[in-house]
Amino acid sequence: MKTFLWGVLTMSCAVAALFFFHYWRLSRDRLFAYFTVAFAAMGLDWLGHAFVPNPNDPLRPEVYALRLFAFIVILVAIIDKNRQSRRR
């Protein structure tokens, strides 16, 4: 059952990444590019949970490294967007 749910989460992150990629292609706004990368990384994280044996083991930090990367990318995107709006 967990594998099925991880697959659902992987697919939902992929759909969100495609959604943001589509709007990045239309607007060329860096915020959408950052969110595309973040959701793709989260999708890979959930995919890693499905394929790594015993991903909830505390000695498996590589499974959560992609999620940490995704959240850092989101923070950078927010900071970058706020800096752009102050310059205008």
Image (cartoon, rainbow, N blue to C red):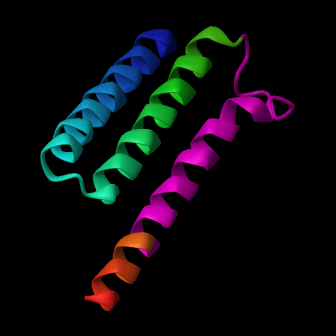
Residue at (32, 58) in percent of width and height = 31
* Image vertical order of residue 67 relative to residue 44, above or below: below
- Give yes or no for residue 72 being in the magenta stretch: yes
Q: Position of residue 6 (x, y in %)?
A: 46, 20
Q: Main secondary structure of the magenta part?
A: helix
Q: Position of residue 8 (x, y in %)?
A: 34, 19
Q: Position of residue 81 (x, y in %)?
A: 35, 72
Stretch of the chain drawn in magenta: 53-79
Residue at (28, 83) in percent of width and height = 85
**Most foreground residue, 17 or 46:** 17
* Image vertical order of residue 77 relative to residue 2, above or below: below
**Most foreground residue, 24 or 6:** 24
Q: Position of residue 29 (x, y in %)?
A: 25, 57
Q: Is residue 71 left or right of residue 37?
A: right
Q: How many numbered discs sit on the rendered protein?
A: 0
* Image vertical order of residue 10 relative to residue 69, above or below: above
Quarter residue 57 falls in: top right
Q: Is residue 65 left or right of residue 60?
A: left
Residue at (35, 31) in percent of width and height = 13
- Give yes or no for residue 74 being in the magenta stretch: yes
Q: Is residue 39 left or right of residue 76?
A: left
Quadrant showing the C terminus:
bottom left
**Most foreground residue, 47 or 58:** 47
- Extreme residue in the left direction: 26
Residue at (76, 31) in percent of width and height = 62
* Image vertical order of residue 16 relative to residue 74, above or below: above
Quarter residue 84 falls in: bottom left
Q: Is residue 17 left or right of residue 55?
A: left
Quadrant showing the N terminus:
top left
**Most foreground residue, 9 or 57:** 9
